[in-house]
Amino acid sequence: QAPEVCRSLILVNTLHYFPKWLESSIFFHIRKARALFLTPEQQKVMAAKTCLYSWREENLQEFYKLYKPDKKGYLLAMKACLEVDHRDILPYIKIPTLIIGSQYDAITPVGIQIMMHEMIPNSELVIFKKSGHISKFEAANEFNSTVRHFIDKHKLHNKAV
């Protein structure tokens, strides 16, 4: 939307389109009910079980320390997702673009990242195995290495303002 101010994109476990029919689906209503009626502790457990691939105790404990449920923020984010439709602009992206997805992402399934990759010319696609929605948490070393490689490959560090 503003190519003159953007040198590159890194799209991580995200979406480019949210079908309108999902708003009236059970999926949307269950997510909304969880945000409204679960306690913060219940929300943490539900988020961990939804977002993480590995439910090892150490992963769960680290996630619980980092995740701070925010009902209002979550509901606003869900509402914003309903308005996402960038299908028409993706083919016009001409800057270096890295798309990262996760094999076991239950929030934004890997197929969404594959579709974005197919729509953005010359984009790069990396799918992390044995990782859920929060790949930068579950595959931190590989994630950081991938981002560093992308930045180095496109010499983006020299272009920082």
Image (cartoon, grey):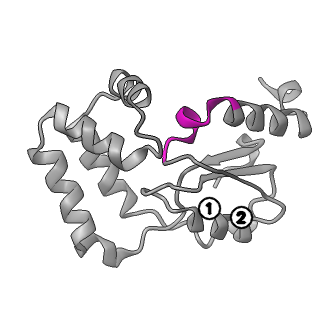
| Residue 135, magenta (yes or no) | yes
Compared with residue 80, is residue 56 higher up or lower down, i.e. above or below? above
Q: Nearer the viewer, residue 78 or 135?
A: 135
Q: What mark, if any, has residue 117 been given in the picture?
A: 2
Q: Position of residue 47 (x, y in %)?
A: 31, 43
Q: Position of residue 94 (x, y in %)?
A: 81, 58
Secondary element at tag 2 = helix
Residue at image point 68% right, 44% down: 10
**Location of residue 60 by image quarter:** top left
Principal SS element in the magenta part? helix
Q: Residue furthest front?
A: 56
Q: Are marks 2 and 1 in contact (CB under 8 Å)?
A: yes
| Residue 58, magenta (yes or no) | no
The residue under label 1 is which amino acid type? Gln
The residue under label 2 is which amino acid type? His
Q: What mark, if any, has residue 113 been given in the picture?
A: 1
For the question of whether residue 89 can be seen, the reply is: no
Q: Position of residue 148 (x, y in %)?
A: 79, 31
Q: CA distance from mark 2 to mark 1?
A: 6 Å
Residue at image point 62% right, 61% down: 113
Secondary element at tag 1 = helix
Stretch in magenta: 133-141
Q: Residue furthest bottom?
A: 21
Q: Position of residue 56 (x, y in %)?
A: 42, 34
Q: What mark, if any, has residue 148 been given in the picture?
A: none
Compared with residue 40, is residue 32 higher up or lower down, i.e. above or below? below
